[in-house]
Image (spheres, helix red, strand yellow):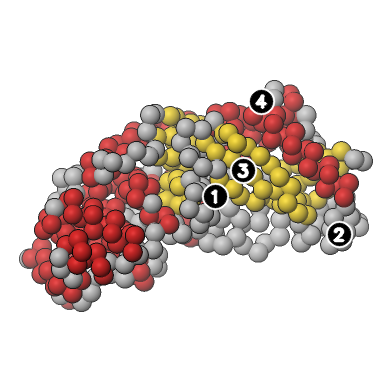
Amino acid sequence: MAAGAGLLGQRLPAAAPGDATLGPTPRATPGPDLRQPPDAVRVKAAARLLNLLGSRLQDGSRQEVMALGVDQRARQELRILRSNVRTLGVTDLSLRYVRDRSDVVRAAHQWVGDVRVRWRLSGFDAHDSHLVVPVTFSRSGSQARFVTARRDDGGPTPMWLLEPVAVRRTPRSLVVTSAADRTFRYSGLADQAVADVLAVLPGWSGRLVVEVPGGEDGRGVPGGLARVLGSQPSAYAEIAAVTTTADGSVNPDAPVHIFVNAPVFDPLGPRGAQIVMSHEATHVATGAARSSMPTWLMEGFADYVALDHAGLPVKLMASQVLASVRRHGPPSHLPGTADFGPHQKALGASYESAWLACRLLGRTYGERRLVAFYRAADRASSTTRAFGSVLGTDEEAFTRAWRSELRRLAR
């Protein structure tokens, strides 16, 4: 599950892959019947090709990699793949043929197969990512050739499979962008986000990976972020960034990256951009992408880290919820999961009220106990026991104090 959202940008989990078939409409002339059991020769040819491709992408020359392509377009894609693998420091790369895609029909001598891709970003990912992507092959006799790995069925695809990437590394962050002129800006934001997290969580020893897909995918199709995460482009129309696993899985060992939606993020000013990046970095540091704790605490704590040491006026950063309090009085309860839905009209107010709740906890009990409360709630997937064992109170009493604080601030 994706974690994210902040006062300056909505985020939501990636949706399930779409049902659109992969590739163009079949020609009128009959081709191979891919609904029949897979051709053993074809499967073996694809497996041999993938073994060669995996090893050559990491260790082969450009000519050796490009020689595996069926035509000039395929060779150009392979050239980009080789460059991306070397630039990113991709290790543990393997490509394994899983099955024929019997639901997809290609031209004669071409077919689509599902391929399990395994990879790791050296020095930043502690474990491998795994993702099944459709790859188009062409066969001549017993030999297979590469056609493309750029899927168009709406499913998730690693950024390095879609488009050329530029990279900037520092001791604590790795930024992957689609344009070299943006790497320095994002790298500075990422490093400052690490510093912001360490100010509250000094024991964190992790590193950030920030991926910034282009506004278009590798074929010029709008919605680069949606293409990487496997969602409809409209799902990210107002989303600045999302923190989720690199392969979209719920595997507890899957690497977690920050994915930035450049068309929404880039127009933010320096402060706004930093707040979003530090918020997302907090999610990485606390493992929020796989947490089932109450959403108000998850999101409120991330904004606490991003905002409470930024010196910004509370009335500015909580303007929506305070305006609502002046008109209607304070909410009767802490915001629930439904209040953070991407289509909620009062979404901004929900994030602000969650931040003010964590801000009150920090000011009342101290930052260390706030962190302890957060970790206890994370372990239990609930705040019920954490309120009593860590803070010596209960949610009902805290909610009354929070409502009083909202009234005070609104005045």
Q: CA distance from mark 1 to mark 4?
A: 24 Å
Q: Secondary structure at mark 3?
A: strand
Q: Secondary structure at mark 4?
A: helix
Q: Earlier in the sequence, mark 3 or mark 4?
A: 4
Query: What is the number of the mark on residue 59?
Result: 4
Q: CA distance from mark 3 to mark 4?
A: 16 Å
Q: Quadrant of residue 85?
A: top right
Q: CA distance from mark 3 to mark 1?
A: 10 Å
Q: Amino acid at mark 2?
A: Pro
Q: Nearer the viewer, mark 3 or mark 1?
A: 3
Residue that mark 2 sits on: 37
Residue that mark 3 sits on: 118
Q: Secondary structure at mark 1?
A: loop
Give the residue displayed 29% in from the left and 53% down from the top. 302
Give the residue displayed 29% in from the left and 56% down from the top. 375
Q: Disc 3 vs disc 2: Cβ atoms closer than 8 Å?
A: no
Residue 65 position (above or below residue 236): above
Q: Amino acid at mark 3?
A: Arg
Counting from the top left corner in percent of width and height, residue 194 is at 31, 39
Q: Disc 4 vs disc 2: Cβ atoms closer than 8 Å?
A: no
- Rate crowding at label 2 as few (under 14), some (14 to 19) or many (20 or more) other CA atoms within 10 Å: few
Query: What is the number of the mark on residue 247?
Result: 1
